[in-house]
Amino acid sequence: MSQRLSGWLRASAAALGLLASAPTAIAQPTAANPQTVTMWSHWPDEASKRGYVEGRVRAFETSNPQCRVRLSFIQKADIYTSARAAVRTGQAPDIFWLEPDEIAFARNGFLEPLDKYVDLNGLEDWARASWTHNGRVYGLPLEAYTVELYYNRERVRALGVEVPGNGQMGQAQFTDLVRRGVAAGVTPLAQGVADRPFPGAYFLEEVLLRRLGPDDYRKLLTGRLSFRDPRVMAAMTWMRELVDIGAYPRSMATLKLGESHYYFHTNPGALMFPIASWYTGRAFVPPESGGQPAGFPLGLMQYPAMENSDCPECKTLAVGGSYVMYSRSRNKECAGALLNSFVNIESGNQWMEGVLLQTGIRTDPSRISGINAPYFRELQQRSEGARFFIGTPLQYMTGRCADTFQQVLNRALPGGQITPQDAATQMDAACAAAPQ
Amino acid sequence: MSAPAEAARIALSAAPRRWWPASRQGGRDPGAPSWLTLMVFLAPALVLYAGLTAYPVIRTFADSLYDLENMDAPRFIGLAHFVQIWSDETFLRAIRNTLVWSFIAPFLDVATGLLLALCLYAGVPFARFLRIAWFTPVLLSYVVVSILWLWIYNYDWGALNLALRAVGLDGWTRAWLGESNTALAALMVTHAWKWAGFNMVVCLAALHALPSEVLEAAELDHCGWAAKLRHIIIPLMRPTLLNLYILAFIGKMKVFDLVWIMTQGGPMWSTETVSTYVYKRAFAWNTFDLGYPSAIAVVWFIIVLAAAALLHLAFRQREKLEY
């Protein structure tokens, strides 16, 4: 009897042991039974970024045979719409692409904190801060950028204007350049806002940042400083003056972001292009793929500083495209390992060298080489001595305030559709009461 | 047999044959299917309808009563969203734009369709080719139509501005989609262009169905084309034209794709429609709160339903009065 009982007990213990170990055996990925991580990335039409991500994923799969990655490149707007619906139903991919202004995903518990998966010391402090919510880091800040003012050296020179060595023009000098461009039949500033809520405001926001300094600029973006402040009004009035002279293309409203690149460097060509430093993603590809022509005389100047600017050396630095992990992912082990494989100096340098763009991953820029190294040196030169303001307006604004920014400062003001007074009134009405 | 029983027997014998299963009390019609058979055939459609139409509608009505900012802890707020809606300037602007579009644009749609149908009816040269060409836009998706018209409206090289410049009207050129006072009209024209072919086909069918003796009698009375059109053709086609108007009206109350691709509601909300606003509030406002957008959808659902019913009643009443 006791033998039978002990037999039963042994069998039961073995069965329980098997049951207990079963989930572990299923969860543990092996080369024979690999975990497949689904990953959605933006940048389907930016060859250099796409190439970089594909390369990193391939390298990860080679060194981690227990993990497979199903990588898709999808346009940003489609990722946002799909992800927003998918996270609610448990259908979201393990890893997807977001920008820090979408922190609501983390607030609602849809993102997995990366603290235990990723070596956070391998990230720049400011980049980590952009993805920190309640003390935890939710995004891998792969892409970072500064807001730059590119120009065509030859066209500007042909107008008899010499850009100062430090790239810094004053208000009067810049207005004169715009006038000369219009008189010569060349659009001074290429810009397209048809498919993006922000590029039309680049010029104004950089001028405002320099005029107000970082503290007051932050107050402006968070509804604690009125847009009717005399300094803000002066900047908007100057902007409207430039618009009335003819600074922007009349087709701006229907010009898409990608098309505005082509407008600047190829057809019809413009003097300047206010855009983030991710210009290279679309421009540094072969001309037949929409890139700038070979030997294009690309230059970088500083945004003009108005008189009495509080911080002429200020500049926007922001985290852009990042990768996040879905909190309900069933493949967190491989997904975390994949994200961590991006975080090392070699990977960061590879990004900068290949994409020619800043990153939130720690890097060693002195090791950058290659045919586009001179461009990268100039980009760094333009940021020497700069005082960075972290984040773009849309990373501070939400809801109605962000919508009004999009309609008023991104479209209507540069489109000459609204007076500075009306613009200020609308922005104040939408942002002053906005929850921060 | 008692009088009531006799009356019931007569009523039963006079009643049309039922398609539904007879009740136990009423006796069973041997030709009628059983409830089980009916349900087997109806179930797939009913399940699809319940899952894909009824449930989302009920859920939208329910969500409109909650603050869903925190998904894990929905907060019941009653009718607060419905109160808030009426002080939402963007929503009111979206309603105005949508109503302008819905009431005015169908005239353009129906008139264009009628005009094209009359051309074909009158036997213009290359009628077969033109009929296909004019109908083709109906087959195109909104994405294609939008991109096509984005090019046509382009300020620098768009066909419209090039044509104006070619005839010396440089002063008339403008950024059609970039200016608040022309953007909505530009979208209305695009929408009319897409649907003109559909209206044309329906009008053409109605024209061919007109009683020939009436038209011939008018010709015998030396009635000219214009008079025949005004006094005979249009009055006879009234029901068709009214139905087209109502169809166009309902379509425009829901318009989204065209606006989203061409202007995203800009500039300055001048082309914002209720549909684009609901979408923005639900998916583009950096929030997960579906409560407020659901409230907008509920209000708009009721408005569309009421407007369609009113139009239907008004036109039906008119018909009754005339005939």
Image: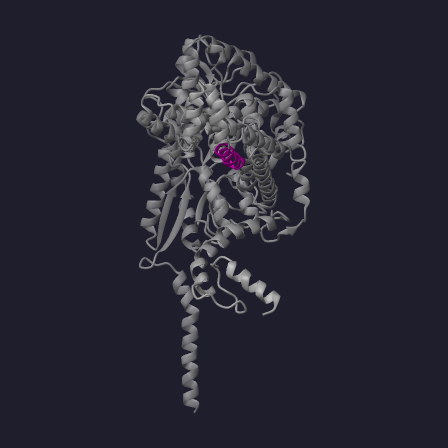
- Of A48 and B162, nearer the camera is B162
Residue plotted at (67% across, 37% down): B86
Q: Eyeballing the image, is B276 above or below A175?
A: below
Q: Is the magenta stretch mostly helix, strand or loop?
A: helix
Q: Residue B18 in the image: x percent, y percent? A: 48, 59
Q: Eyeballing the image, is A413 above or below B318?
A: above
Q: In this view, does A418 lie to the left or right of B48?
A: right
**Figure quadrant of the C terminus of chain A:** top right
Residue A171 on the magenta span: no
Residue B240 on the magenta span: yes
Q: Residue A421 in the image: x percent, y percent? A: 65, 20
Magenta span? B239-255
Q: Eyeballing the image, is A31 above or below B191?
A: below
Label count reads: 0
Q: Residue A117 in the image: x percent, y percent? A: 46, 51
Q: In this view, does B41 lie to the left or right of A394?
A: left
- Of B246 and A13, nearer the camera is B246
Give the farthest residue toward the bottom. Answer: A1
Q: Residue A409 in the image: x percent, y percent? A: 57, 26
Residue plotted at (41% across, 25% down): B216
**Figure quadrant of the N terminus of chain A:** bottom left
